[in-house]
Image: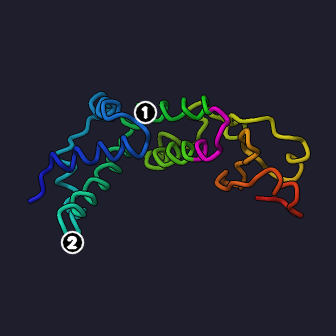
Amino acid sequence: MIDNGIVIEKAIRRIADEYGFDIETVENAINTSEVPLDLEKMVSEGIFCFRGPNEDVKYGNAALCLSNKILANAGVAKRLIPLICERIRNWDHEDIEVLLSELKKVITIMELNPDEYPGLQKCSIDPKDLPGEKIPDDIKEKCDVWAMDKKGMCLVGIDANKLMHIDEIRKAPASCS
């Protein structure tokens, strides 16, 4: 028999670890959500998630299912998304992979709440004006660069999901989309 309390605890810890929050922040988002969550009921409804060869895997799978249900709650998303967006706006320009990671986090939660969050603009981030170093004009002509860090690594691609160094872009014969 699976212990619901352990699944709930693991799900909250999973969200905190994956999204860079402390546990108290995640618990606060759950407890103050405008759309109340019945975590015990959510665990029971997700009984199909309790699969695996041993207890650790079963609990891990159940926690994964529950964490996605929690993040798909519009009230929880409303509490957590602004915190991630603030980290994006305050990105220090040091490592483009940090910015990409934060973008993936916020987009993942937004995709779980598509009616509430049709795009980054909903959290006051213009994808065409992400923080970063000034992009040289010769690069702008060759490639759509979303952002660049202090080392010249650039976030490129139609979905802003590829990384290229500025020197690679300069050498590339065609567009880098």
* Quadrant of the rendered image containing residue 121: top right
**Percent x, y of residue 143:** 82, 52
Residue at position x 67%, y 51% from top?
160
Q: Residue at x 80, y 50 (%)?
A: 166
Picture quadrant of residue 95: top right
Q: Earlier in the sequence, mark 1 or mark 2?
A: 2
* Relative horizontal placement of residue 60, taking residue 176 as reference (left or right): left
Tag nearer the camera, 1 or 2: 2
The residue carrying mark 2 is 53
Amino acid type assigned to the residue bearing label 2 in the image: Pro
| Left/right of residue 152 with respect to residue 97 in the rendered view | right
Q: Position of residue 79 (x, y in %)?
A: 41, 31
Q: Residues within 10 Å of mark 1 (few under 14, many from 20)?
A: many
Q: Which residues are magenta?
A: 92-100
The type of residue carrying mark 1 is Lys
Question: What residue would you read off at disc 1?
Answer: 78
Q: Answer yes or no: do the residues labelled 1 and 2 have beta carbons within 8 Å?
A: no
Q: Is residue 150 left or right of residue 91?
A: right
Q: Quadrant of residue 25?
A: top left
Q: Nearer the viewer, residue 107 or 21?
A: 21
In reply to whether residue 1 is colored magenta, the answer given is: no
Q: Is residue 54 above or below residue 125?
A: below
